[in-house]
Image (cartoon, rainbow, N blue to C red):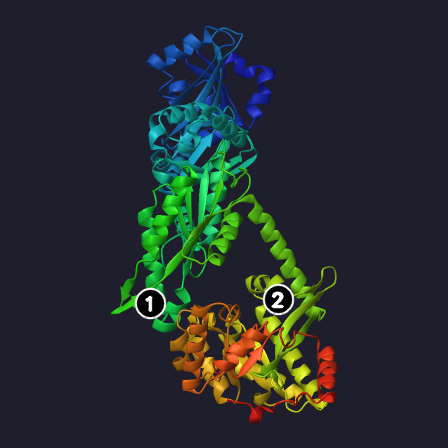
Amino acid sequence: MSKLPKPASAERPEFDGLRQSAIEALIIDAGSGRIDVASRGYCALTGHEAEWLEGRALSKTMPDLGKGAGLEELRRISAAPGSLETLETRVLRSDGSPVIYQVTLEASERPGLLFAFCRSATELKQARDDARTARDRLLTAIDALPDGFVLYDAQDRLVVCNDRYKELYAESAEAIVPGATFEEILRHGLVHGQYPEALGREDDWLAERLAAHRLAETEVEQQLPGNRWLRILERRTPDGGRVGLRIDITQNKTRERELRQAADTDPLTGLLNRRGLTARLEEIAAARDHCERLAVHHIDLDKFKSVNDMLGHDAGDAVLIHAARVLRRQTRSADIVARVGGDEFVVVCRDAGPEAELSDFATRLVEELSRPIRFNGKTCHVGASIGIAISGPGPGPGETHCHETPLLDADIALKHAKEGGRGRHVIFRPGMRDAARAAAQLSHEIKTGLDRQEFRIWLQPQFDITGDRVTGFEALMRWHHPERGLLGPDEFLLAAETARLIDSIDSEVLRLACTAARSLRGAGIGEPRVSVNLSTMRLSDPRLLDQISWHLQCAGLAPQNLVLEILESTLLDERVANVVENVHRLSNAGFSIELDDFGTGHAAIANLRRFPVDRVKIDRSLVAGLDRDEELRIITTSILALCRGLGIEVLCEGVQTEGERALLEQAGCSGVQGFHFAGPMPPDDLLAWLADRQEKGRDRMAHPERAPS
């Protein structure tokens, strides 16, 4: 390897440090185009010794810079002391192979002298290529995401987003470009209907969205056009930017809505259920800026249970579906229709008219719901009772304040409609609420009274027609109220029925009647016969026979000691199928069956043939004034003759005068009961009364086996 004479600068001691440095560097004399100094690092790069490089033409190691235009560029740079430029050029190794290097040229204070610092451009290029490949891969991966991806810089300018992001924000797509700020994109979307949830409150919505965007982490849901929904997840990056995902949750929302609708919908009729009705009313209350006039109609289907009992549940379902169709057909699209119970519906009329219109509407509903329908060749007859409550502005006396729900008031009005005879409607009045509270309080007191055994029975004797012989007793309930004193059944039985406490009262009457009968027998009265009135609810209970038998067993009595009274109106009740079965079971078990208030019902004669009746009790209304009313005397005499012809015992109740007794005896009546002979009295007083009569020898107690049957 030939050595060249060293340039003068190579002998300068201040460059010794550079010569020994591992940095890949040269000192170039631009005027001559030769290398003055080569560092140890550059020698290692090229594979040449310093002695070979120093003094040699630059073109031997950097062919593009050492001659021609390249050399002229070096001379231009060196002419401006302190100037700095970077360029890429080939560097030849000792084996002749080229490598691309990035060369930074710095002009020395000495004219024509350049410092050249080299860095492998091949490695830089590879790094750039690797970075570009990684970036391309990242962008490909981002574009492949099923969710929208977006990145904003620290100044909230868009850096990058994937195609899915633009697809989700189609109305804003033209504004979603690199460099656009988040707020600019939002404002563009607001103008073009991108955010339906912002309609009418754009400024507030924008402020809320920007505030959420500035948080360190954000998770919100956002509605888009077409009822599409996104979940937005955003997080601040270490450099102050924001990275976010937009996840399409429309299917989840749809499923949630379907589940919510299923939870709010009655599966049989497709109407709202009670939960759905409550939710709709809450929405109306929350959304309105002023009180909206609502009319709530609480509808109960009359005689529905008889359809279920006699024709089966399929027929009952058909009636409910038919009722739902009627209600839909009779209401407007804005109105709300719901099924809130087995046979109960609610119609809420929005922007309701005056009471007269609502009354006409209710009358029309009752008429339509009362029309018979056919099911499997059979006719189903039902009716309807309606309670109406009005909420909202208006002068009507029954209208409540805007914040009050009328559902409870409509239910109260419905109870009044049903108590008034059914097949009718009643509009709620404020006084009804007070009455309902009083009834609720009374129901509570009844329950407490039952727990404390405040209820007692009084016994009213029954006689043969002469009044000389006691043939039995009727058990009549009394309540020793701790504050109101002694109360008769008219003062609490209706409340007990409404509160579904009548079964408990019936059980208490049976227990007390059996206890009283045992006491009478223990006092030497013989085998007493005590009449007990059974309610409709009690008679519809299939466990009735077992329950009565249990009370008899506890008292050591036989069925012959009890007469079971059934109101004639009970036989016309919807639960008649169960009543008929129970009455026959009781009769077969040895109990005497008495038809109470005979002659006041609609099918008295038919009931004598339908039921195993042992005795009928003619109502007081057919006895009072018998000695003064010829027409009444004819009716009563005909009933007595009919029963005598059928071999049925007759007892006339409410006999007040000797004239009434005498006429009944003349007409062939065999038994009487009333204040003309004796009124009701507590069991202890009755025992004393009976003892007094026996001492005077007026009568003896008739034994059940000898009593007419």
Query: Quick check: 88 left or right of 651?
Result: left
First in sequence, mark 1 or 2: give its number. 1
Can you say whether 435 is above or below 66 in the image?
below
- Decide if residue 130 is in sight here: no
Tell me the number on the disc at residue 315. Answer: 1
Mark 2 Cα-neighbour bin, 10 Å: few <14, some 14–19, many ≥20: few
Viewport quadrant of the N terminus: top left
Query: Quick check: 483 left or right of 195?
Result: right
Front position among marks 1 and 2: 2
Contact between labelled residues 2 and 1, with CB atoms less than 8 Å apart: no
Can you say whether 409 is above or below 654 in the image?
above
Can you say whether 541 is above or below 490 in the image?
below
Which SS class for mark 1? helix
In-front residue for pair 707/276: 707
Residue 397 in picture, x, y percent from top left: 52, 39
Q: What residue type is labelled 2?
A: Pro
Q: Which amino acid does label 1 sit on?
A: Ala
Residue 261 in picture, x, y percent from top left: 41, 51
Mark 1 Cα-neighbour bin, 10 Å: few <14, some 14–19, many ≥20: many
Residue 308 in picture, x, y percent from top left: 38, 69
In-front residue for pair 125/600: 600
* Residue at x 65%, y 65% (from the top left corner): 447
Query: Mark 1 to mark 2: distance in Å?
Result: 38 Å
In-front residue for pair 43/576: 576
Residue 277 in picture, x, y percent from top left: 45, 49
Can you say whether 514 is above or below 258 in the image?
below
Tell me the number on the disc at residue 352. Answer: none
Q: Name the residue under label 2.
A: 489
In-front residue for pair 131/348: 348
Quarter location, residue 702: bottom right
